Image: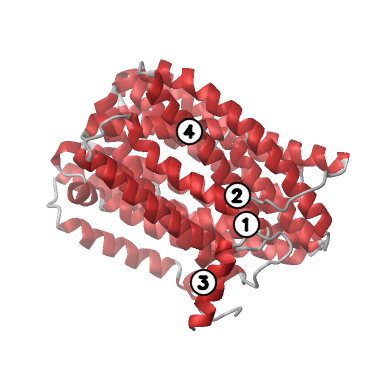
């Protein structure tokens, strides 16, 4: 056992290898990636929690908006290089082309550096305009933009290279150091945008550890065009889907000010952690689907899409349904009276985040096929973001934060519906009953939320109603629950 642990530490400290995948099953890889994303999600949640409680709602509004600005800018190209690395490195491994894998990593590495630095520079004047702040604060946002760009790329490299345990180990290590840095800054009395610097250190350390130093060569022109086309389409789609959530935070700041933006951030912090399940699945599902597509194993490709969709529907509706029903209790316990009002935003945001996560398997299925599939995802994301933006312009001035949350929900539903419908029809999946039950579950959760607020039920009743919701959901999905994977920690060793 000691030798095994020592070997794991040695592999963790060595430069990432593109030709030495670790034997990991899809289920076990999902567990590893979940652990890593939980660690990263914990860092973001802890940042919001500690800043909100120790520095106040207004400071949280500024910090959350700074993070949202950096993450949105990184979506313009660097973040999608990670998805490209995950897909094309896995495809090259499936085709047994190590030279192509090294050249692909080198090309994406160069693009990440070019765009990351450029977007870091662009973020400086953008943050000065958004926050009417100082240049030193804007430099913190620039550093976060660059660091997150590197993190997104190197995480995709490790997953595409089959180094999932290594990626997870660095996730946990960097997060521990980042949390320690955040506590130090808060105790030192820092109360401005500099509170994002622990995130800069976290993502920067991960980037250095996962950088593909051994990548070399130049892909053929056809492959270079395919890589750049994939990233370009993915960047547009990511900006309009993942970036949509970040833009809603910025919209809250611009529409209602720092304090209200802090309240919106508190609700977002509670709604998004549960989406880590779908995000972790994406990290292992996209390489797995790409390998199957590279082998022309279409039956396995279709089966993975179906299993992932059914599993996500069962688990995510249960999780987000409970969050919706217990929103009053959760906000009260975690945020307290200072953030009163967030409990009305949380059910709406939870439903929106649920919608964006239900389509994960379909989005990956389209991305794995071709650039035409990516264009479908991109078009759906742009359409959804435009729908949300129109609602923000028309409704937000009158409803405030509720209007921002409503716009995000409507846009998220559009973004999710289009890829699900396309894959459903194209591959002939039998998902009619799956989504009928999803709709029924959401109606039940929403009805319970309305009853709680209209009747003014005592907070201790929230968990009781949540248990009732879970019981009904389990009865509706007994067969699907029985099919859920139960990974063993020893599998694949």
Q: Secondary structure at mark 2?
A: helix
Give the x, y percent position of residue 84: 69, 46
Compared across the picture, whether 313 is left or right of 290 comes to: left
Depth check, mark 4 against mark 1: the one in front is 4
Answer with the quarter of the image where residue 407 lies: top left
Give the x, y percent position of residue 348: 35, 40
Asked if the residue under mark 2 is in contact with the one under mark 1, i.e. CB atoms within 8 Å, the reply is: yes
Depth check, mark 1 against mark 3: the one in front is 1
Residue drawn where x is 62% and y is 57% of the image = 158
Residue under numbered circle 4: 143
Answer with the quarter of the image where residue 287 lies: bottom right
Residue drawn where x is 57% and y is 80% of the image = 491
The answer to which of marks 4 and 1 sits earlier in the sequence is: 4
Tell which of 383 and 165 is nearer to you: 165
The answer to which of marks 4 and 2 sits earlier in the sequence is: 4
The C terminus - image quarter: bottom right
**In the rendered image, is residue 23 in sight?**
yes
Residue under numbered circle 2: 154
């Amino acid at each position: 056992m000691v030798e095994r642990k020592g070997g794991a530490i040695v592999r963790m400290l060595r430069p990432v290898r593109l030709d030495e995948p670790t034997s990991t099953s899809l289920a076990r890889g999902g567990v590893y990636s979940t652990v890593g994303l939980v660690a990263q999600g914990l860092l973001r949640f802890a940042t919001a929690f500690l800043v909100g409680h120790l520095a106040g709602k207004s400071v949280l509004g500024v910090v959350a908006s700074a993070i949202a600005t950096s993450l949105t800018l990184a979506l313009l190209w660097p973040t999608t290089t990670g998805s490209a690395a995950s897909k094309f490195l896995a495809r090259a491994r499936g085709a047994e082309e190590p030279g192509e894998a090294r050249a692909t990593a080198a090309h994406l590495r160069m693009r990440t550096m070019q765009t990351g630095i450029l977007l870091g520079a662009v973020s400086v004047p953008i943050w000065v305009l958004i926050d009417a702040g100082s240049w030193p604060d804007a430099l913190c946002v620039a550093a976060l933009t660059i660091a997150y760009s590197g993190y997104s790329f190197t995480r995709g490299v490790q997953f595409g290279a089959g180094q999932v345990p290594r990626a997870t180990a660095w996730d946990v290590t960097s997060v521990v150091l980042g949390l320690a840095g955040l506590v130090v800054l808060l105790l030192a009395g820092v109360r401005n945008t500099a509170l994002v610097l622990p995130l800069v250190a976290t993502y920067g350390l991960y980037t250095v550890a996962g950088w593909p130093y051994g990548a070399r060569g130049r892909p053929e022109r056809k492959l270079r065009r395919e890589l750049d086309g994939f990233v370009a389409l993915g960047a547009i789609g990511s900006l309009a889907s993942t970036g949509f959530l970040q833009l809603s935070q910025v919209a809250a700041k611009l529409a209602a000010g720092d304090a209200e933006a802090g309240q919106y951030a508190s609700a977002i912090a509670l709604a998004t952690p549960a989406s880590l399940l779908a995000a972790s699945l994406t990290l292992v599902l996209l390489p797995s689907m790409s390998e199957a597509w590279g082998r022309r194993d279409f039956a396995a490709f279709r089966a993975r899409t179906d299993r992932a969709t059914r599993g996500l529907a069962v688990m995510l509706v249960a999780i987000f349904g409970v969050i919706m029903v217990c929103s009053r209790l959760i906000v009260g316990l975690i945020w307290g009276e200072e953030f009163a009002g967030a409990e009305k935003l949380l059910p709406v945001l939870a439903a929106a985040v649920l919608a964006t996560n239900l389509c994960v398997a379909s989005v990956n299925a389209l991305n794995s096929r071709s650039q035409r599939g990516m264009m479908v995802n991109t078009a759906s994301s742009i359409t959804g973001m435009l729908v949300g933006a129109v609602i923000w312009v028309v409704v937000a001035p009158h409803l405030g934060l509720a209007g921002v949350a409503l716009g995000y929900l409507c846009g998220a539903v559009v973004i999710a519906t289009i890829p699900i419908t396309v894959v459903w029809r194209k591959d002939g999946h039998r998902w009619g009953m799956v989504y009928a039950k999803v709709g029924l579950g959401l109606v039940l959760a929403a009805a319970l939320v309305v009853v709680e607020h209209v009747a003014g039920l005592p907070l201790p009743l929230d968990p009781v109603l949540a248990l009732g919701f879970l019981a009904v959901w389990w009865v509706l999905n007994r067969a699907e629950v029985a099919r859920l994977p139960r990974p063993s920690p020893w599998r694949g060793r």
